Image (cartoon, rainbow, N blue to C red):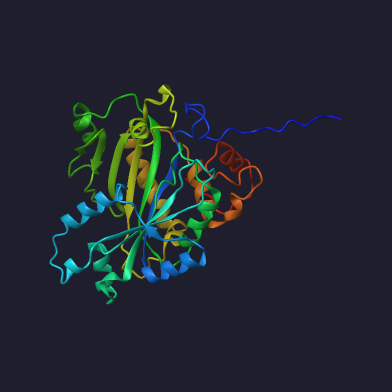
Amino acid sequence: MTKIMKVSYPSIADMAFTQSTITHKQLGIDTIELIARYEVFKKMADTLGLTIEPMPKRYKLHEKIKKEVAKDTKSRRLVDEFTPIVEMIRLPKVGSKDKSLYISIVRNVPTLFDVAKHHKKAKGSFCRVVFAGLHQPTKKISSDAMKIISKFLKRKTFKLSSVDIAIDTTDHRSITEGRQEEFKANLMPYSKSGINLEKGSYYVNQVKHQSISRINYYDKYLKQLEQQKKTKIGKELKAWKRLEITLTFDVTKRENKGFIQHIESLNFYNTLHDIDEVASKANIKRYATDYLIYQINSLLDNRFMNNHESKEQFNSVESLERFNSSDFRRYILAI
């Protein structure tokens, strides 16, 4: 009797990451932000058996919210009575020792007051729902977590507010002041309003484009060392850089039918071509779209991630390989 050897694929988060073990030079969705009626969102979370809890003060999101409130220049009636509320939902993990993804829920911030005023609702009616960390090669993402996220994304009444698209690349040059003007010149006309340099990152915060509102180019290797100190990252990834492009949408428009409707529209295809132009100007000439296509197909239809070999970890090397070798897919990206 021939003994069959079971092949155990190493996941991208089970080893010291190197150029050969990381899903590198990929395009993917990293963050999705929705605007929803809080009571509707809460009811849906309860139905799914999810627990909404206060977000601990140590999370960096609290600082971002403080800055957002401080920048608000509008005169708002009774605004002092509405203190920002930041909550979270912890999503299923791959293993007990792994960090889990979580959903951020933000209430009582200026942009939500504007949405409530537009709909003639009470100030605290709406919330901001954020799904972050969806394209992080050095973090295990649970398939069960992605299934839960997809349920919220399919809700048409949850309006699409923003999407962060990220491209990983290799760039041996440091992100410094000496390179700032060159980067600005290359990125024209997107960088016309200027580029800021902060902690190894170039920020273009005022992009005058139909959908692109922000561009960020930063040292992903250094950021990984800072944020995930226990993660082993090979020194050969020192040149790992990331380009992040933020797309923003008007949540008050009737044609805004949520995330799924947008990615299936021609507008998304047009935006991807714009993203490719930005990447080219940033000297990112080659990158793969496999992970983005896998993400979209999985969010549209959970069966893409529900197979025996990769049902626990969504973003494993094995999961992506199996998807690429499969003919079963609903969404094809013609770019």
Percent x, y for residue 28?
44, 44
Residue drawn at x 21%, y 35% as measured from the top left: 185
Classify residue 256 by image quadrant: bottom left
* Relative side of 37 to 197, left or right: right
Residue sitting farthest toward the top: 236
Q: How many marks?
A: 0
Query: Which residue does the image show at 61% across and 54% down from the upper left?
Result: 303
Give x and y (percent) for residue 29.
Answer: 42, 47
- Residue at 45 percent of width and 62 percent of height: 261
The image shows residue 31, relative to residue 180, as above or below, that is below
On screen, 160 above or below 27? below
**Residue 116 visible to the viewer:** yes
From this view, report whether residue 121 is shown above or below residue 280.
below
In the figure, residue 183 lies in which quadrant?
Answer: top left
- The residue lying toward the viewer, choosing from 152 and 298, is 152
Which quadrant is the N terminus positioned in? Answer: top right
Question: x, y (%) of residue 173?
Answer: 30, 24
Q: Is residue 115 left or right of residue 26?
A: left
Residue 7 drawn at (x, y percent): 68, 32
In the rendered view, does 263 fall on the left or right side of 175? right
**Of 105 and 298, which appears nearest the observer?**
105
Q: Quadrant of residue 27?
A: top left
Q: Nearer the viewer, residue 206 or 153?
A: 153
**Which residue shows up at 33% across the image and 64% down it?**
127
**Residue 157 appears in the picture as rendered:** no
